[in-house]
Amino acid sequence: MSPLVERADRLAALAREREIDLLLVSEPLNLRWLTGFTGSNGLAVLGTAHSGPQGLFITDFRYVGQVAEQVPPLWDRREASLELLGPALSEHMPEWAGEGRPRVGFDERHVTVAQLGRVREAIGERCELAPAGGLVEELREVKDAGEVSRIREAAHLADRALREVLERGLAGRTEAEVALDLEIAMRRHGAEALAFPPIVASGEHGALPHAEPRAIVIEPGVLVTIDWGARLEGYCSDCTRTYAVGEPGDLEREVYAVVLRAQEAALAAIRPGLEGREVDAVAREVIERAGYGEHFGHGLGHGVGLAVHEGPRLSRHGEQPLMAGMVVTDEPGIYLPGRCGVRIEDLVVVTEDGADVLGTLPKGLQVVD
């Protein structure tokens, strides 16, 4: 069974558990995961009959050829108007929708109020509309072998790009120049896009977790935090390293050592069955014990896949147990306003008995030119 057919089977079963007869999927990343379609305007209508899933895929004239190439024969592929959640849905409502008044699930997280109104107008009293958000995202959290392979390749590509940039040095270049160099290097190594705009933050600017690169020259004697990721075949990587430009001071060395201990302790703790908040607590305890607890304000990590931020959450509020196949970040940090910041991040896949790091870069404090 192909991965796409298997995904449709699993989604139909999950929707059936929620008493959904037809499920509407239109959010682009969810649509790509389910059908393979990479365009920007498509609608999948998945039936959940016990005899097996039945699928209708609707798009507009711009994507008819693309759908023929990407979407498997499981889906009855049809062309309709640009407004898919509306007249097109009414025109192509499947004959196998079911007897009586079938329940149609829609994703309230991604369907706007205006779109929902058009859906109501299109299907009228024929169906009952039911919120069914998060079903696809729930299944996306556990990656299959092909997805893990793509994420690993994206991580290796991003690592090669950063090594190339570091060979050219950091001192004397602006943060913005380094970020642009890194972006170009990732493209040169085969990235189809950036997973997100790179963060390059030196000195006291590193105390901002989501700092934007500035036209400020990187001076010797500071720490530089670099957070970057590549997108390859739709899948993202995410990694952070903090480097010393010239010899760091005693405080910088101390903070780096604490973050590294916290990061490695959390990495050793990751395994199936442990809740995200429990892994977060492992790293947080190390940082709090060293006296820097108030300077670690974000969660330990998050899931990565077709989106660079997706479930599960590794934070104080992450109640979901980890499962083998989940790909998550482990990225504790300490941020000292007016002085420096340190974050060390690995991208890992949860295995049956622990975690496998997908990146290749060392984590010890490195001094670069």
Image (cartoon, rainbow, N blue to C red):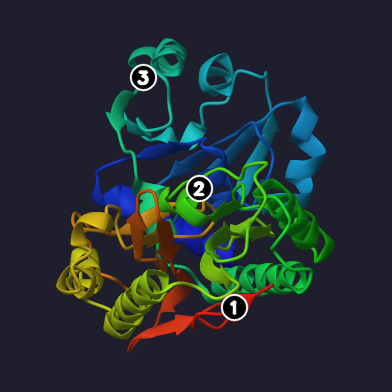
Q: CA distance from mark 3 to mark 1?
A: 67 Å
Mark 1 near mark 2, Cβ–Cβ under 8 Å? no
Query: Does dot 3 land on a helix, a strand or a loop?
Result: helix
Residue of label 3: 126
Please name which of the two marks, 1 or 2, marks the residue nearer to the observer: 1
The residue that appears at 20% across and 62% down in the rendered structure is 293
Of residues 255 and 61, the one drawn nearer to the viewer in this rendering = 255
Q: How many numbered marks are there? A: 3
Q: Which mark is residue 54?
A: 2
The residue that appears at 17% across and 72% down in the rendered structure is 285
Residue 302 appears in which quarter of the rendering?
bottom left
Residue 42 appears in view: yes
Q: Position of residue 145 (x, y in %)?
A: 54, 76
Mark 3 near mark 1, Cβ–Cβ under 8 Å? no
Q: Quadrant of the N terminus?
A: bottom right
Q: Give the mark nearer the N terminus: 1 vs 2.
A: 2
The residue that appears at 69% across and 62% down in the rendered structure is 171
